[in-house]
Amino acid sequence: MKRPVSTPLVFAGVVLALAGVATAGGALQTVDATLRGAASTAPADATQQHPWEQPLRTTAIATPRAAFEPMQAPGRTRPNLLLDAERLQAARQALEAMPGLAGERLVVFHSIHFHDDGRIDIDLVDPQQPGHVDGYHYQRGQWRKGDAVNPQQFAPTISLRRSSTALANIDFDAVPRVTQALQQQRNALMRTPAQVGHVYVVIRKGGKLVWLPDEVAGDRQTVRLRYDARGNLQ
């Protein structure tokens, strides 16, 4: 026959059970509070996506701008010397004023060459040694003395005696007249006429001046030109 459980023992068991429930409830509250705290400190999107599902974030890198450089104005092209009578006369006066030539009677040997880019080439007889000839070159507004010239290398057709004349006999204003006449003929006879870039005068027997070029080869015909000593088309 079983003995009934005593009342004190039953009461003690109930107390122990209630204590266990209370302890468990506190633990659950602690866990819940911990989870709530972690959720509040985590990023908002972390609660929605796994780390491997989050979009890749990139940092923009600023590209340094190049320093601003003002645009350079294109340089001015100097006027065509062949058409600039003022510059031609200034070049002549500068030649006559050069050391060793100033105040002397200047004699030109054989030829003078004029170029559209501002160059002039001339051979002069040495005022102090009439048997010597030297080249002179004009460029960028300045004259310089060049190399010695051997007149005998052109013999017998060209000689110092028969192919020389005073600089005073040569009119530099003839250069624009020859250039314009030559260009007009090129424009008339050529479909695509080239610009005149070189004009020269040659001294022939007796000091006769011959201006060149004196020929225009057109598309359908070739024309010979003749100028007088002052560059006028005849």
Image (cartoon, grey):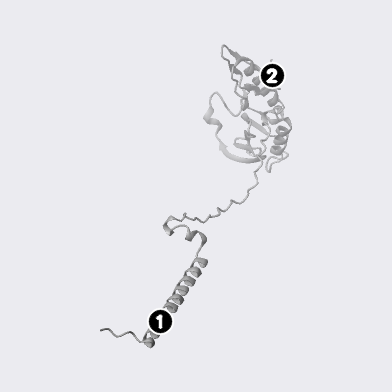
Q: Secondary structure at mark 2?
A: loop
The crowding category of the residue bearing disc 1, from other C-alpha atoms within 10 Å (few below 14, some 14 to 19, many at least 20), is: few
Q: Earlier in the sequence, mark 2 or mark 1?
A: 1
Q: Residue lying at the far front in this picture: please name it.
A: 1
x then y, percent, for residue 163: 61, 26
Residue at 59 percent across and 23 percent down: it is: 194
Q: Amino acid at mark 1?
A: Val
- 78 displayed left or right of 155: right
Q: Quadrant of residue 105?
A: top right
* Secondary element at tag 1: helix
The residue tagged 1 is: 14
Name the residue nearer the viewer: 70 or 137: 70
Estimate the x, y position of residue 67 in percent, counting from the top left: 61, 51
Q: Nearer the viewer, residue 47 or 139?
A: 47
Q: Amino acid at mark 2?
A: Asp
Q: Which residue is mark 2?
A: 228
